[in-house]
Amino acid sequence: MDDGVGTRRTEPSTATDAETAEESAQSRQVKRSARAGRSRRARRNRLLQAGVLVGILALWWLITAIELVDPLYLPSPQAVAGAFLDANRCLVVDDATGRTVCGVQNYYLWEHLIASLQRIGVGVSLAAVAGIALGFLMSMWEPANTALAPYLNFLRALPPLGYIGLIIVWVGIGDTSKYLLLFLAAFPPIVIATIDGVRGVRSDYLAAARSMGAGPGQVARFVVLPAATASIFSGVRLAIGFAWTTVVAAELNNGIPGIGGLAYISGTQLNTALTIACIIVIGLVAVTLDAIIRWIGDRLVPWHGKV
């Protein structure tokens, strides 16, 4: 009898364990299938993108090979690659004296790029500090929003080339004018994103924090700021994009060293191959910066879109 009772008690447990193990195995299989599907889609997407790139390069090479367009206006891919390499090394320009020239305009291309990135770093950093502070003020104090919103929208609508001359008159052609121009390009999207993020915080989160005795400072620090971080990062991401597209305008005057200034000067000198090389570098760096900011945002705000 005892054996029967013991058997009857262990059978349901054994069956339950078997069902749980089977469900776990099915769940793992589903996850593996989902990962495999995502991997296949990613490979297909990369192959498609690579195919489009190869097609563009082939068409570009064909047009220049048959001289459908004058090389002055559209140099070959080989010429652009050569200009890029020459801009990053030293060349002998006079065999008799052995005189060499390194880079372009006394700087390597990568030095021009670093100079532009430094200017953007300063301008966007200042815009982030001021923009986040103003965004919090405008979102949490309605009179400030009412007073400043029209002027913020006015500034956002202005193209950088529209006021670059005025900035040069005010502060000269040094780096200060470039910092200010990049600051003005990055400032509005950060403010707007901060306002949207703060106002998008769920009211039940705020009520729950206040019901537990949190003061205004604690609510702002531990509830509002974490909830608005994802939106703020989106604003910073947009701001970096706007600032990077403004770099050529910022470096039109006394922009050497600078990748935008180099692109402008090489264009005025009809060095089309180097101009295209600079444009390609500017585009690749823009994509890289965007990917880095997106990666940082995903790591700092892992809960975004999941709660």
Image: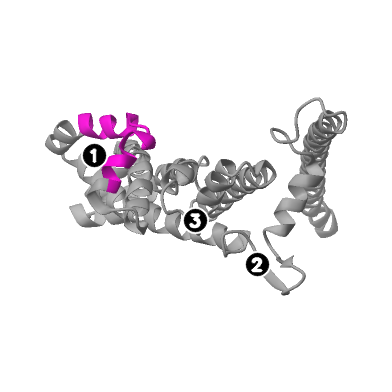
Residue 111 is left or right of residue 167, and the answer is right
Could you say which disc has been placed on residue 102 in the image?
Answer: 2
Q: Which residue is most to the bottom?
A: 97
Secondary structure of the residue carrying tag 3 is helix
- Label 2 environment density (alpha carbons within 10 Å; few <14, some 14–19, many ≥20): some
Residue under the image location 26 percent in, 30 percent down: 154
Asked whether the beta carbons under mark 1 and mark 2 sit within 8 Å of each other, the answer is: no
Q: Which residue is mark 1?
A: 139
- For badge 2, the amino acid type reads Cys
Per the rendered image, the range of residues in magenta is: 149-168
Q: Is residue 2 above or below residue 156?
A: below
Q: Nearer the viewer, mark 1 or mark 2?
A: 2
* Residue 65 occupies quadrant: top right
What residue is shown at x 87% (from left), y 28% (from top)? 66
Task: Check if mark 3's residue and mark 1's residue have beta carbons within 8 Å.
Answer: no
Q: Which residue is mark 3?
A: 116
Quadrant hosting residue 151:
top left
Q: Amino acid at mark 1?
A: Ser
Name the amino acid type tagged 3.
Ser
